[in-house]
Amino acid sequence: MDDALTAQKSRAAAAGGPAEIFAAEQRSLSGTAPTGVASPGTPLPDGAVLDPYGTPTTLRAVLGGRPAVIVFYRGAWCPYCNLTLHTYQAELAPALAARGVELVAISPQKPDGSLSAAEKNELTFAVLSDPGLAIADALGIVTAPSDDARAAQLELGLDVTAANADGTTRLPYPTVLVVDAGGTIRWIDVHPDYTTRTEPSAILEVVDAL
């Protein structure tokens, strides 16, 4: 997955214009260390979520008391997110299913965005909306694009406020959590640079240590 992400970053940097702004943002984010992130050993926060058809439920109900890998992503509009979800479907979902571990993906987008992500990447695992980023906020993994990045997004026809359920530009840092059957966070991996993601092998190593 790293090689594919690196290739996308190189193409973007070479394109100029908004891509240069995004590249500068990525360089800034890569040196960021978010504060207030939930620590291993603390309870996973619960909250209201929506399934891809807009049906309300809670994260706790979806997990059903099972150990889980929870993936926070930015939205179906993000090519890095789609690549990651597609990779997790191919390389992670079957391995987790064999271990009796749930795989759940969560974003702040509207339910139709969740449905788009699920269909585009042929996902067999739960894809949910955290409509006001309540769960992401409780985990301390929320950020927002810079003014320059926001302007570049709009120049490319991307309006995050139209995609997000709460109408804001706020987004979660790409994050993976491993949670045990009791709902305790056992591992959390946060990526301030949204062009990098957690490798499936690293996730399975933690799951196998539960």
Image: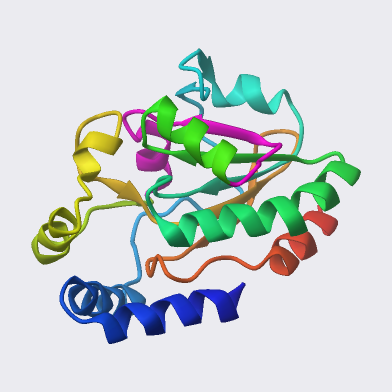
Instruction: Specify the quadrant that holds the N terminus.
Output: bottom right
Residue at left offset 73%, top offset 41%: 180
Percent x, y of residue 194: 40, 65
Residue range (magenta):
121-140
Percent x, y of residue 57: 53, 15
- 75 and 48: which is toward the camera: 75
Instruction: Name the quadrant containing residue 138.
Output: top left
Residue at left offset 49%, top offset 81%: 6
Taking the magenta stretch, the answer to whether it contains residue 131 is yes
> Does 15 sit above or below residue 146?
below
Residue at left offset 23%, top offset 50%: 158
- 23 and 56: which is toward the camera: 23
Horizontal placement of 171 versus 39: left or right? left
Percent x, y of residue 126: 63, 32
> Does 14 sit above or below residue 201?
below
Farthest residue, direction right: 98
> Does 71 sit above or below residue 2?
above
Taking the magenta stretch, the answer to whether it contains residue 73 is no
Residue at left offset 46%, top offset 62%: 80
Instruction: Name the quadrant containing residue 159.
Output: top left
Horizontal placement of 164 versus 192: left or right? left
- 183 and 134: which is toward the camera: 134
| Scheme of image coloration | rainbow
Percent x, y of residue 83: 55, 60
Asked whether residue 147 appears in the rendered view, the answer is yes
Asked whether residue 43 appears in the rendered view, the answer is no
Total labels: the figure holds 0
Horizontal placement of 209 versus 80: left or right? right
